[in-house]
Amino acid sequence: MTSARVLRLAVGFYILLFFTYLFGPLIVMSFTAFNSSEFPSISPWNCVTPEWFGVLFKDQHLMGGLRSSLLVGIGVVLLAVPIGLAASLLITQLQKRARSIVYTIAISPILVPGVVLGISTLVFWERIDRVVLGVEDSFFYDGYFMTIIGQSTFIAAYAMLVFLARLQRFDPGLEEAALDLGATHTQVFRKILLPFLKPAIASAAVLAFLASFENYNTTVFTIVSKSTLTTVLASKVRYGINPSISALAVIIIGLTLVGAVIHEYLRRKEVAKTEALAAEGLPAPTRSRSGNRVLRVPVGALASLIFVAMLATAWIARDYDVAQCKVQVTEENRKKFDALKQQRLAEAKAKREANRQDADVAVETNQAGRQYQNIFAPTNLGSQIDSTEPSEPDSDATTAVETNQAGRQYQNIFAPTNLDGQVDSETKDE
Amino acid sequence: MSADVQLENVWVQFGDFVAVRDTSLTIQGGEFFSFLGPSGCGKTTLLRAISGFQEPSRGRVLIGGKDMAGTGPNQRPTALIFQNLALFPLMSVWENISFALEVKGVNKSVRRKKADELLELVALPGQGDKMVDELSGGQKQRVAVARALCAEPEVLLLDEPLSALDLKLRQHMRTELRAIQQRAGITFIYITHDQGEALTMSDRVAVMRQGTIDQVSDGTIVYDRPETAFVASFVGENNAFPGRVIEVTQGIASVQTKSGVLHAEVSAVSPLTSGDAGIVFVRPESVRFADPSALQNRLEVTVANQEFEGHFWHLVLQTAEGSVIRMSVMNDGERETYEIGSRIAVSFTAQGAIALAQGELAAE
Amino acid sequence: MAVWFRRFLARNGTMLSLYMLAAVALWMVLMIVLPQLFMLDFSFRHNWQQIDPSRMGGPDDVYTFVNYHFLAYGSPNNPDPFNVVDVTVFFRTIIAAIFVTLFDLALCYPIAYYLAQVARGGKARLLVLFLIIPFWINELLRAFAFRILFGEEGTINAILLSIGVLDQPIDFVREDVALYAGLGYAYILLMIFPIYNVVESLDKNQIEAARDLGASWARIHRRVVIPFAKPGISSGCTMVFMLSAGALAAPQILGGPSSLWFTQIIYQWFNTGSNWPRGSAYAIVLMLSCVLLVLAIMRIFKVKIGEIGR
């Protein structure tokens, strides 16, 4: 029993660690978006501020990149989804051998590194442009065109996998039934197959758009002189970072969460529907009721958590003045900086002071005592003070130590009082 | 409107495999015709050849006297009811039923009206707006029939449509289908491996074996006067006594079997002569407890088991040389029970048995 | 073939058949096969376009191994016996990608197993949803998050300094820790899902039977679960390996100043180096090595290519 509990604890801990790895970076990044610090970080927390969102929206490069990313994304959806659909339909009709050949070619773009796809697309259309058409910068050698083509090369394969998964559950009898009732082939496709594939088309389109939207490896080669959100982001992240990038991440994370909640809501509605059917005692694909109830709690909790967080933000923002906070932080920083500087200066001054006094004393004693110690006394003294060696084998040094100790006592006594005057004079000098 | 269906020397081959072998047959217009056979006998292939999903490799399919070669399933005057029904799950009941009109471009109100009429016909009034998933098995069945009828076919083809239903519902739907066929007045071609379905509903039954038709006749004749050993063993239960024909006199054959010489009628269609290898078939219900006077076809047996099935007792008997005989006794409340292991004598009349040439038997 | 085509036409009708064949042909020919062939062709050419465009198409425009030779031996006046920089970067990339793959496998197998066999109903679904959420977020932004965490003044250093574990910040970026953590993070999902899908289809009774027969947990995994999950494991490993060897964003953002990723060299040939043929040759070498390595490993573990991506 105890070993089972230990195991369960270990598993729980592992899952916790795993999800910390998964979400920790995103959470930290999200927080940096609200910190007024010029550099994205949370460790010196300055002020809560929404200003980076403003900076983000004013960033012409990023906004321009966003627009072209949307354009490219739409282009990819329009190209890759129909291709994926055609390929999935064809593959389901092929015989064993031909099917595996076509399937292998079709999924190869998923396995080929993205940079290779980008390069091959770039080289191919540049060649078409230059050699076949004999003109430069034609329609084909265009950043948007090549990016749409290059991304669609592998995104079409994703779409195909989505369709194949759905088609596996399709009953070919439905097609025959429709044909038998007099439908033409086109009608069968339009009225039977397409409606069946509609959810898959929707998910393939969303998948294609998102894959296009976040693609970098292929795009960076094919986009040529233009830029998409990812290429702008990449250059920003590499060269100059400020937290407006974090602000962008917060927006994307927010949208993703909203999407996830909607997805979950729709699914639950679906489940509820089949359950209602099952409750009437009719055959319907059913999921366990308890499973659904278990699910309802965490999703509800997540939604309410987000809601509470929004409320709290609004509440704090109500009587919170960023400008004031910033002034305060700047003031605090200045003070902190000043204090630090003063401390440093004070230390330096004290040291110098002490050195001077010790040196004086030492010189006196030296002069009173042995002549020859003069040679090394000034240099030696400082280190002796620092190391404060109580026992010195040399008898001459012993006297020196004694005087040093005298000097130290002095230093200890007047050092604190002396500091202010020194620092004042130093700061005035600046 | 109903049409004849003629098959002329139809062959269907898949590579080396012959699914249908040289089949010729005429199905009359308005007839309820069944193909009965074990799975893999080629009956579904034959149905697909009639509906147009499968072009025959050789031979012709004629519907209403017209050769159907090159005519696709969507242009034939046939409608098929699929084994799994193949109702469109994303459409409502009425949309399913009126699909054949939808593809012809008929407007919605006309379609709706026709669908409601058909729902009346199949005894599902007012269910048009439900989704298919909300129906029970029997209701789905009726919707499938209504959908097929909406195409106004001259021939309705049914591919084991009742196999997914439970026993009670299946028996009810048999009556229902027969009634619908009579109301609609069109040719029904029905495929099944269930002899009960074939015998109760059909005007005529074709028994198929390995791509060929063994016998075509009405249900009683198929049962009482089988023409081949396969039909005798596939349709209903039969006790088989293989042996050699000693002599045939006045339509009665004497066959030397392991259980002695047995006498049985000879089929008029497939006559036997002495020396042939033959099998004597006796139905369990034709086996009687032997009178002391009965000397012909008398067998001394041991009771091995007895099963009670309400209106019948089924006895499993064993002869001295080890063959098993099944016997059914009407439960008239007067019968004494037999201890397992007790020895009795049973017999049957020559008229209650039939002698056929040896051939392939149906798998148990 | 002709028979198949006739049946295909009959089954789909002219319009649909035309659409299917045209779309697939367009994809496979113009987008997959021809571009790869052109890139292959290009990698065997001189860079006349940049050096001297007038020599293009002339007698000097011939096939050459010069680009591949450069990758192996460097420029003619290279004093070393081989191209130390590029070759080192190449092998380091491959080895690091293998390391990232193994890291992900070790990290994800327990989670995939837990999700597929231990967690139930709603909880499992919710965890799967949580798994997916981070992967809708741009790869660059994820790398950026790691830069915030691992920077010299980043969160991790700040925490370690404040609790006194360190008295000097560690430069995680220079040490490549940030890069490996970021790459490993980037492809977690691609490792988990193939394994999850396979393990989910494993009959729970098999595990229980094995346990009933007295097998230890380690043995159950070694003898029952892992052999069953092999297609999923190899599929996940293949994808993670290919993607991390071919990654560009994460190395650009998280890579230390002195450590290059091979894709970055390719990028330089295309971008600042203006030598496309040489970049193409490098890309081909990268792709072929990765594919061959994957095929070799799949042969060792007896997995078929068709099982990938399911």
Image: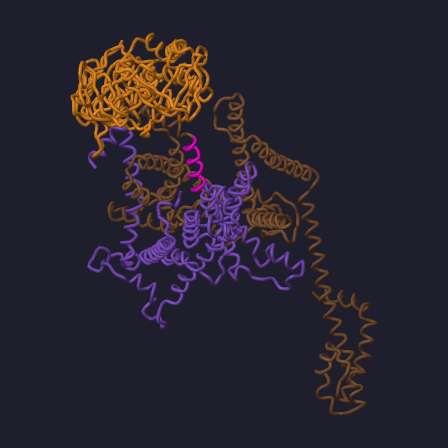
Q: Position of residue B20 (x, y in %)?
A: 22, 26
Q: Is residue A236 left or right of residue C88?
A: right
Residue at far front of view: B292
For image coordinates 48% across by 28% down, the residue present is A285
| Quadrant of the image containing the C terminus of chain B | top left
- Could you tell me residue B94's position as x and y percent? 41, 15
For the image shown, how many numbered marks are present on the structure? Answer: 0
Of residue A54 and residue B364, the one placed in the foreground of this image is B364
What x and y, as percent, mark residue B303? 39, 24
Reply above or below: A322 against A265.
below
Residue at 62%, 64% in the rendered image: C168
Q: Quadrant of the N terminus of chain B?
A: top left
Overall secondary structure of the magenta section = helix
Please indicate, yes or no, whether residue A344 appears anywhere in the rendered image.
yes
A10 vs B329, nearest the viewer: B329
Question: Is residue B72 visible to us here?
Answer: no
Q: Which residues are magenta?
A: A199-212
Residue B108 lies in quadrant: top left
Q: Nearer the viewer, residue B59 or B26?
A: B26
- The chain coloured brown is A
Residue A202 magenta: yes
Chain ID, orange in image: B
Where in the figure is residue A210, as x and y percent of width and height? 45, 40
Q: Which chain is purple?
A: C
